[in-house]
Every structure is written in C-alpha cells, then in structure tokens.
C-alpha cells in the first residue's frame, strides 16, 4: 500500500463501480491491431450498410460528416485487461445509418478495410449504444486507433469496436468474426467477463 501515491486512492474511489472484474485502469491508450495499419484517404472512404437481401446504402466522407454528430464520453475495456475511463469521441450514432435500411436481421457483422470482422447483435449497435467515430479527444482519429473512422461500442470488450470500419452487414444468423472464430466470446460483456468461448 505504501508504494501507491495518494492520488491513486482518490482516483480509485472516483471510479468505484466502473471497473469490470479482472480489469485494471490505465491512463495510456494502447494500440492493439492484428495486422498492419491500413491508410484510407477520406476522399476514397465510404461506409456501406448491406442488408440480408444484398441491398446497400453508402455514405461518402462528406455525407457522413453532414449527419448529426454526437460527442459520447465513455469507458472502454480491452480483453487484455486494461480499461480506460472517460474517453471522448465524436461521431455519428449507428442508429442514423441503420434507420435508412429495411431489414429484419437481428445480427450484424462489422467489416474493416484491413479485413477484420466482428459480430454483434443488432440490438447492441442501436438505441444509442454505438458510434461511427472519426475524432478522439478533440482531434481527428489517428490511423493507429482506427482513423479515419472506427466503430465504438463501449459496453462490450473493445475488440468489438472495429477500427478502419468500411461497413456493416445485416445477417439473419450470428456469424462469428475474426477473434470470435479464434476462441474469443461471441458477445463479450466485460461485466460478465465473457472473454473466451468457455466463459
Ligand atoms: N480493423 C480492426 N479493428 C480492431 C482491431 C484490429 O486488429 N483491426 N483490434 C481490436 C482490438 S483486439 C482492440 S482491443 C481494439 C484496440 O483499439 P485501439 O488500438 O484503439 O486501442 O481495436 C479492435 N478493433
Ligand atoms: Mo483487444
């Protein structure tokens, strides 16, 4: 106990109830990428929602930036056990995009420019719970952290927050993504410690 600074105790108390089991708080912002960082210029960027019937709706960068913008401040939790409190993003609620398509699918797969995929229930990316974010802490999102735009789904482990997102596919069935096919949990609730298949 003697090795902890007084500030640490104050901080711990302020964040009481906000640290999921098995996690530790960090001030830094680690970069976790399965492969090299793709560089996607915004003039060639687009975001596409595809329905189960193959119908698509796409937005260019400028069209996306003209949509209503939100500034969520949220806690994020990585399955490698770091949690970061009060991260500040700017972007568009996924509701805005999903409201534009006609689909009865209850699952989605997020697809990224690096080939990464991750599956989520539609319920978890609607109702004000998920954003397509293009700025972090007041600045354009850096390529390492998923710029020009990434998914932010703070209530699930951070691997669900696809960096360099290029689209969302609506699927009738749950289709495991990159990490979910490799042993990570299909849903990934940090509060229930759903890290691996066996959890
Ligand atoms: N496209 C893509 N998205 C990704 C990843 C990735 O490798 N590729 N890694 C995931 C993992 S495991 C985590 S923990 C977070 C890390 O985001 P950060 O690098 O901004 O901390 O991004 C997630 N999104
Ligand atoms: Mo991760």
Image: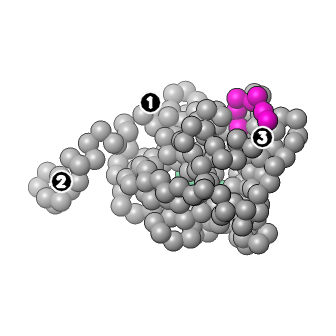
Residue 164 visible in the displayed image: no
What residue is disc 2 on? 10
Nearer the camera: disc 2 or disc 3 = 3
Q: Is residue 39 magenta?
A: no
Tell me how far mark 2 sits from mark 3, CA to CA: 47 Å
Judge from the rendering whether residue 138 lies leftward or rightward of residue 42; answer left or right.
left
Q: Tell me the number on the disc at residue 192.
A: 1
Q: Is mark 3 within 8 Å of ligand 1?
A: no
Q: Main secondary structure of the magenta part?
A: loop
Which of pointers 2 and 3 lies earlier in the amino acid sequence?
2
Say few, some or many: other residues with alpha carbon within 10 Å of mark 3 (under 14 / 14 to 19 / 20 or more). some
Identify the residue shown where x is 78% and y is 40%: 101
The span shown in magenta is 102-108
Q: Relative to 107, does residue 69 appear above or below in the rendering?
A: below
Identify the residue shown where x is 76% and y is 37%: 170
Q: Secondary structure at mark 1?
A: helix
Tell me how far mark 2 sits from mark 1, CA to CA: 26 Å
Name the one closer to the observer, 2 or 147. 147
Mark count: 3
Nearer the camera: disc 2 or disc 1 = 2
Q: Secondary structure at mark 2?
A: helix
Q: Tell me the number on the disc at residue 87.
A: none
Colour convention of the picture: one colour
Q: Is residue 103 magenta?
A: yes
Nearer the camera: disc 3 or disc 1 = 3
Q: Secondary structure at mark 3?
A: loop
Q: Residue furthest right?
A: 54
What residue is disc 3 on? 101
């Amino acid at each position: 106990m003697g090795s902890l600074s007084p500030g640490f105790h104050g901080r711990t108390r302020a964040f009481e109830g906000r640290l999921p089991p098995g996690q530790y708080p960090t001030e830094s912002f680690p970069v976790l990428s399965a492969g090299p960082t793709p560089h996607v210029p915004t003039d060639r960027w687009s975001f596409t929602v595809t329905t189960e019937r193959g119908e698509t709706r796409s937005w260019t960068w400028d069209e996306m930036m003209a949509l209503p913008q939100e500034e969520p401040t949220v806690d994020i939790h990585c399955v490698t056990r770091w949690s970061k409190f009060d991260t500040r993003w700017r972007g568009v609620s996924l509701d805005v995009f999903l409201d534009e398509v006609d689909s009865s699918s209850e699952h989605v797969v997020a697809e990224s420019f690096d080939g990464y995929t991750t599956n989520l229930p539609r319920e978890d990316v609607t109702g004000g719970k998920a954003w397509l974010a293009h700025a972090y802490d007041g600045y354009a999102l850096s390529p390492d952290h998923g710029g020009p735009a990434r998914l932010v789904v703070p209530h699930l482990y951070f691997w669900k927050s696809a960096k360099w997102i290029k689209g969302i596919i609506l699927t009738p069935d749950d289709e495991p993504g990159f990490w979910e096919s490799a042993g990570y949990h299909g849903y990934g609730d940090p509060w229930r410690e759903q890290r691996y298949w066996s959890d």
